[in-house]
Image (cartoon, helix red, strand yellow):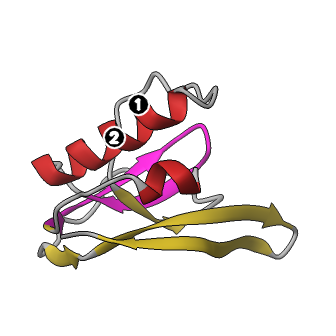
Amino acid sequence: MQQVANSIQGKRFNLSLDIISYWPRPRVLWLGASETPLALQDLVTLMTTGLQDCGYRPEPRPFQAHLTLMRKANQAKTHPTITPIVWTVEDFCLVRSTLDRSGARYEVIGRWPLN
């Protein structure tokens, strides 16, 4: 994964986080982007293509840029409309996610700048 990430020359972009939603099966409440910037789509495609050569099989679901707000959340009947939060993305990271009794832990393995 690090070798694939080392080979990527992606572009910086702004990500507008403008929706709150819920995935019922994992019971996750999330903040996400209703539109995926072209530079992010390109980054996902480059990583996915490069990793397939290493045996990685991408999920069949479409990519959804998001931040997890809460795990084990109960589904609300409605979600509030929010003022968009614009995030200037200047790099990307490889992160190891571990779930245990105390919750989720995240460890940054590597970070790569975007041009």
Q: Quadrant location of residue 15?
A: bottom left
**Circle 1: residue type:** Thr
* Other residues around mark 1 within 10 Å, as few (<14) / some (14–19) / many (≥20): some
Report the residue at 52% width, 27% height from top: 52
**Disc sitting over residue 46 in the figure:** 2
Q: Secondary structure at mark 2?
A: helix
Q: CA distance from mark 2 to mark 1?
A: 5 Å
**Camera-side residue of 37 and 5:** 5
Q: Which residues are magenta?
A: 14-32
31 lies above or below 75: below
**Circle 2: residue type:** Leu
Report the residue at 12% width, 75% height from top: 83
Magenta residue check for 114: no
**Camera-side residue of 12 and 18:** 12
Residue found farthest to the right: 101
**Disc sitting over residue 49 in the figure:** 1
Q: Position of residue 26 (x, y in %)?
A: 62, 44
Q: Position of residue 33 (x, y in %)?
A: 22, 56
Q: Position of residue 64 (x, y in %)?
A: 33, 45
Would residue 46 be found to the left or right of residue 22 on screen? left
If the image is split into quadrants, where does the C terminus sit? bottom left
Q: Is residue 58 visible?
A: no
80 lies above or below 58: below
Q: Position of residue 105 (x, y in %)?
A: 71, 74
Which SS type dominates the magenta stretch?
A: strand
Q: Is residue 42 visible?
A: yes
Would residue 100 be found to the left or right of residue 43 on screen? right
Would residue 84 be found to the left or right of residue 57 on screen? left
**Camera-side residue of 105 and 21:** 105
- Asked if labels 1 and 2 touch by Cβ distance under 8 angstroms, the answer is yes
